[in-house]
Image: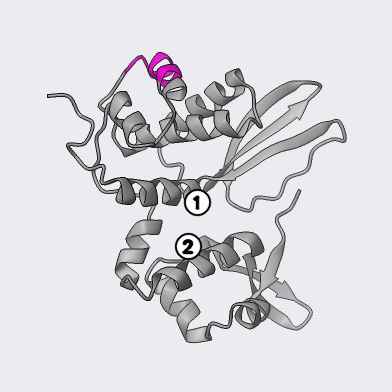
Amino acid sequence: MEEQLITKKELLQITGISYGSLYRWKRKKLIPDEWFIHRATYTGQETFFPKEKILERIEKIKNLKDGMSLDDIAETFSPVARKVEATAEGAVAQGIAPAAAAELYRQVTNSGGPYDFGALFGLYLLGRLLQEGTVIRDEAVEAVKLLLATENPAGKELLLLRKMGVGIFLLAPEGTAFAADGDTNLVLRLPLSQWMAQLKEKLGTTGLDEEAGTEE
Protein backbone atom coordinates (compact mmCIF):
# COMPACT_ATOMS: atom_id res chain seq x y z
CA MET A 1 0.00 0.00 0.00
CA GLU A 2 1.67 3.17 -1.22
CA GLU A 3 1.24 6.35 0.75
CA GLN A 4 -0.90 9.04 -0.88
CA LEU A 5 1.10 12.01 -2.12
CA ILE A 6 0.24 15.66 -2.65
CA THR A 7 1.95 18.10 -5.00
CA LYS A 8 3.61 21.28 -3.78
CA LYS A 9 1.04 23.40 -5.61
CA GLU A 10 -1.84 21.52 -4.00
CA LEU A 11 -0.19 21.79 -0.59
CA LEU A 12 0.17 25.57 -0.81
CA GLN A 13 -3.43 25.94 -2.00
CA ILE A 14 -4.91 23.74 0.73
CA THR A 15 -2.89 25.14 3.64
CA GLY A 16 -2.72 28.77 2.53
CA ILE A 17 0.98 29.03 3.34
CA SER A 18 3.50 30.67 1.04
CA TYR A 19 6.35 29.11 -0.90
CA GLY A 20 8.76 31.10 1.27
CA SER A 21 7.24 29.78 4.52
CA LEU A 22 7.40 26.19 3.28
CA TYR A 23 11.11 26.37 2.53
CA ARG A 24 11.90 28.45 5.60
CA TRP A 25 10.30 25.74 7.73
CA LYS A 26 12.35 23.18 5.81
CA ARG A 27 15.57 25.07 6.56
CA LYS A 28 14.58 25.28 10.24
CA LYS A 29 14.02 21.48 10.28
CA LEU A 30 10.33 21.81 11.05
CA ILE A 31 9.64 19.70 7.97
CA PRO A 32 11.97 16.74 7.31
CA ASP A 33 14.04 16.84 4.12
CA GLU A 34 12.87 13.34 3.20
CA TRP A 35 9.28 14.57 2.93
CA PHE A 36 10.30 16.62 -0.14
CA ILE A 37 9.97 13.92 -2.79
CA HIS A 38 11.23 14.91 -6.25
CA ARG A 39 9.77 13.01 -9.19
CA ALA A 40 9.75 13.41 -12.93
CA THR A 41 6.33 14.12 -14.47
CA TYR A 42 5.17 14.81 -18.01
CA THR A 43 5.58 18.54 -17.28
CA GLY A 44 9.07 18.11 -15.82
CA GLN A 45 10.42 17.75 -12.28
CA GLU A 46 7.82 18.15 -9.54
CA THR A 47 7.90 18.07 -5.72
CA PHE A 48 5.51 15.83 -3.83
CA PHE A 49 4.86 15.26 -0.13
CA PRO A 50 3.31 12.46 1.94
CA LYS A 51 -0.17 13.97 2.13
CA GLU A 52 -1.37 12.97 5.57
CA LYS A 53 1.94 13.69 7.31
CA ILE A 54 2.62 17.07 5.73
CA LEU A 55 -0.91 18.37 6.30
CA GLU A 56 -0.81 17.30 9.94
CA ARG A 57 2.65 18.83 10.42
CA ILE A 58 1.71 22.17 8.86
CA GLU A 59 -1.45 22.37 10.96
CA LYS A 60 0.66 21.84 14.09
CA ILE A 61 3.18 24.47 13.00
CA LYS A 62 0.42 27.01 12.33
CA ASN A 63 -1.09 26.33 15.75
CA LEU A 64 2.24 26.68 17.57
CA LYS A 65 3.98 29.52 15.75
CA ASP A 66 2.06 32.35 17.43
CA GLY A 67 3.30 31.29 20.85
CA MET A 68 6.67 29.71 20.05
CA SER A 69 9.73 30.54 17.98
CA LEU A 70 10.53 28.38 14.98
CA ASP A 71 13.59 27.04 16.81
CA ASP A 72 11.43 25.97 19.75
CA ILE A 73 8.94 24.31 17.42
CA ALA A 74 11.78 22.50 15.66
CA GLU A 75 12.99 21.22 19.03
CA THR A 76 9.51 19.84 19.67
CA PHE A 77 9.57 17.91 16.39
CA SER A 78 13.19 16.81 16.65
CA PRO A 79 13.68 13.03 17.06
CA VAL A 80 16.64 13.79 19.33
CA ALA A 81 15.30 14.71 22.72
CA ARG A 82 16.95 16.61 25.50
CA LYS A 83 18.46 14.40 28.14
CA VAL A 84 15.81 12.78 30.29
CA GLU A 85 15.87 9.95 32.78
CA ALA A 86 13.01 8.29 34.58
CA THR A 87 12.27 5.02 36.32
CA ALA A 88 9.32 2.90 35.32
CA GLU A 89 7.39 4.25 38.30
CA GLY A 90 8.24 7.82 37.38
CA ALA A 91 7.11 7.30 33.79
CA VAL A 92 3.80 5.90 34.97
CA ALA A 93 3.32 8.78 37.39
CA GLN A 94 3.96 11.26 34.54
CA GLY A 95 1.46 9.55 32.24
CA ILE A 96 4.02 8.23 29.76
CA ALA A 97 2.55 4.72 29.92
CA PRO A 98 0.06 2.75 32.03
CA ALA A 99 1.31 0.63 34.92
CA ALA A 100 0.63 -2.67 33.11
CA ALA A 101 2.79 -1.60 30.19
CA ALA A 102 5.57 -0.46 32.53
CA GLU A 103 5.61 -3.83 34.28
CA LEU A 104 5.71 -5.68 30.96
CA TYR A 105 8.49 -3.38 29.76
CA ARG A 106 10.43 -4.07 32.94
CA GLN A 107 10.26 -7.79 32.08
CA VAL A 108 11.24 -7.24 28.44
CA THR A 109 14.24 -5.04 29.23
CA ASN A 110 15.09 -6.63 32.57
CA SER A 111 15.30 -3.11 33.95
CA GLY A 112 13.10 -0.73 35.87
CA GLY A 113 15.19 2.24 34.82
CA PRO A 114 16.35 4.86 34.92
CA TYR A 115 15.43 5.08 31.22
CA ASP A 116 16.89 7.58 28.77
CA PHE A 117 14.77 9.01 25.95
CA GLY A 118 15.27 6.01 23.67
CA ALA A 119 14.16 3.61 26.39
CA LEU A 120 11.27 5.88 27.35
CA PHE A 121 10.17 5.87 23.73
CA GLY A 122 10.14 2.07 23.80
CA LEU A 123 7.92 2.19 26.89
CA TYR A 124 5.69 4.82 25.32
CA LEU A 125 5.34 2.73 22.15
CA LEU A 126 4.50 -0.39 24.14
CA GLY A 127 1.85 1.43 26.11
CA ARG A 128 0.26 2.92 22.99
CA LEU A 129 0.20 -0.41 21.15
CA LEU A 130 -1.43 -2.18 24.07
CA GLN A 131 -3.98 0.60 24.60
CA GLU A 132 -5.00 0.83 20.95
CA GLY A 133 -5.57 -2.91 20.73
CA THR A 134 -4.47 -3.33 17.11
CA VAL A 135 -1.87 -5.92 18.06
CA ILE A 136 -1.80 -8.68 20.64
CA ARG A 137 0.51 -8.59 23.65
CA ASP A 138 3.24 -10.78 22.15
CA GLU A 139 3.26 -8.71 18.94
CA ALA A 140 3.61 -5.50 20.93
CA VAL A 141 6.61 -6.99 22.72
CA GLU A 142 8.24 -8.01 19.42
CA ALA A 143 7.69 -4.49 18.05
CA VAL A 144 9.45 -2.97 21.05
CA LYS A 145 12.34 -5.43 20.83
CA LEU A 146 12.84 -4.47 17.18
CA LEU A 147 12.75 -0.79 18.09
CA LEU A 148 15.29 -1.16 20.89
CA ALA A 149 17.62 -3.07 18.57
CA THR A 150 17.55 -0.22 16.04
CA GLU A 151 20.26 2.41 16.48
CA ASN A 152 18.33 5.33 14.98
CA PRO A 153 14.61 4.77 14.32
CA ALA A 154 13.96 8.42 13.39
CA GLY A 155 12.60 8.78 9.87
CA LYS A 156 11.40 5.17 9.81
CA GLU A 157 8.04 3.50 9.91
CA LEU A 158 7.09 0.45 11.92
CA LEU A 159 5.05 -1.93 9.79
CA LEU A 160 3.20 -5.09 10.81
CA LEU A 161 2.39 -7.59 8.09
CA ARG A 162 0.22 -10.58 8.90
CA LYS A 163 -0.28 -13.74 6.86
CA MET A 164 -2.43 -16.66 8.01
CA GLY A 165 -2.36 -15.32 11.55
CA VAL A 166 1.41 -14.93 11.68
CA GLY A 167 2.73 -11.39 12.11
CA ILE A 168 6.09 -9.94 11.15
CA PHE A 169 7.38 -6.46 11.98
CA LEU A 170 9.54 -4.38 9.67
CA LEU A 171 11.27 -1.03 10.00
CA ALA A 172 11.49 0.90 6.74
CA PRO A 173 12.11 4.52 5.70
CA GLU A 174 8.95 6.59 5.84
CA GLY A 175 6.86 6.39 2.69
CA THR A 176 8.50 3.22 1.39
CA ALA A 177 6.37 1.49 -1.22
CA PHE A 178 6.13 -2.27 -1.03
CA ALA A 179 4.12 -5.12 -2.50
CA ALA A 180 2.88 -8.31 -0.86
CA ASP A 181 0.90 -11.32 -2.01
CA GLY A 182 -2.85 -11.39 -1.71
CA ASP A 183 -2.85 -13.39 1.52
CA THR A 184 -0.68 -10.85 3.36
CA ASN A 185 -2.35 -7.93 5.12
CA LEU A 186 -0.78 -4.67 6.25
CA VAL A 187 -2.09 -4.39 9.80
CA LEU A 188 -0.08 -1.46 11.12
CA ARG A 189 2.00 1.38 9.71
CA LEU A 190 3.39 3.77 12.32
CA PRO A 191 5.58 6.80 11.47
CA LEU A 192 8.01 6.72 14.40
CA SER A 193 9.13 10.34 14.04
CA GLN A 194 5.56 11.49 14.66
CA TRP A 195 5.31 9.33 17.76
CA MET A 196 8.67 10.65 18.96
CA ALA A 197 7.34 14.19 18.54
CA GLN A 198 4.25 13.24 20.53
CA LEU A 199 6.42 11.89 23.34
CA LYS A 200 8.56 15.03 23.31
CA GLU A 201 5.42 17.15 23.58
CA LYS A 202 4.26 14.98 26.47
CA LEU A 203 7.63 15.27 28.21
CA GLY A 204 7.48 19.02 27.81
CA THR A 205 4.00 19.32 29.26
CA THR A 206 4.55 16.89 32.14
CA GLY A 207 7.74 18.62 33.27
CA LEU A 208 9.70 15.37 33.28
CA ASP A 209 13.39 16.25 33.25
CA GLU A 210 16.74 14.76 34.12
CA GLU A 211 15.75 14.20 37.72
CA ALA A 212 12.06 13.41 37.44
CA GLY A 213 11.11 9.92 38.45
CA THR A 214 14.64 8.89 39.38
CA GLU A 215 15.36 7.22 42.65
CA GLU A 216 17.43 8.87 45.33
In this figure, which residue is indicated by the disc labeled 1? 194
Q: Which residue is mark 2?
A: 32
Residue 112, located in which quarter of the rendered image? top left
- Label 1 crowding class (10 Å Cα cut-off): few <14, some 14-19, many 20+? many
Disc nearest the viewer among 2 and 1 = 1
**Picture residue at 26% right of the left edge, 48% below the top:** 82
Left or right, 127 with respect to 49, comes to: left
Q: Residue at x 43, y 51 (%)?
A: 197
Residue 71 in the image: above or below residue 104: below
Displayed quadrant of residue 106 = top left
Residue type for callout 2? Pro
Q: Is residue 91 above or below residue 72?
A: above
Q: Which residue corresponds to the image point at 70% horizontal and 50% vertical from the top-left? A: 177
Residue at (32% x, 17% y) in the render: 111
SS class of the residue under badge 2? loop
First reached walking from the N terminus: tag 2 or tag 1: 2
Specify the segment rendered in magenta. Answer: 103-111
| CB-based contact (under 8 Å), mark 2 and mark 1 | no
User: 25 or 206: nearer the eye?
Assistant: 206
Where residue 202 appears, as percent x and y from the top left, is 38, 47
Q: Position of residue 12 (x, y in %)?
A: 60, 81
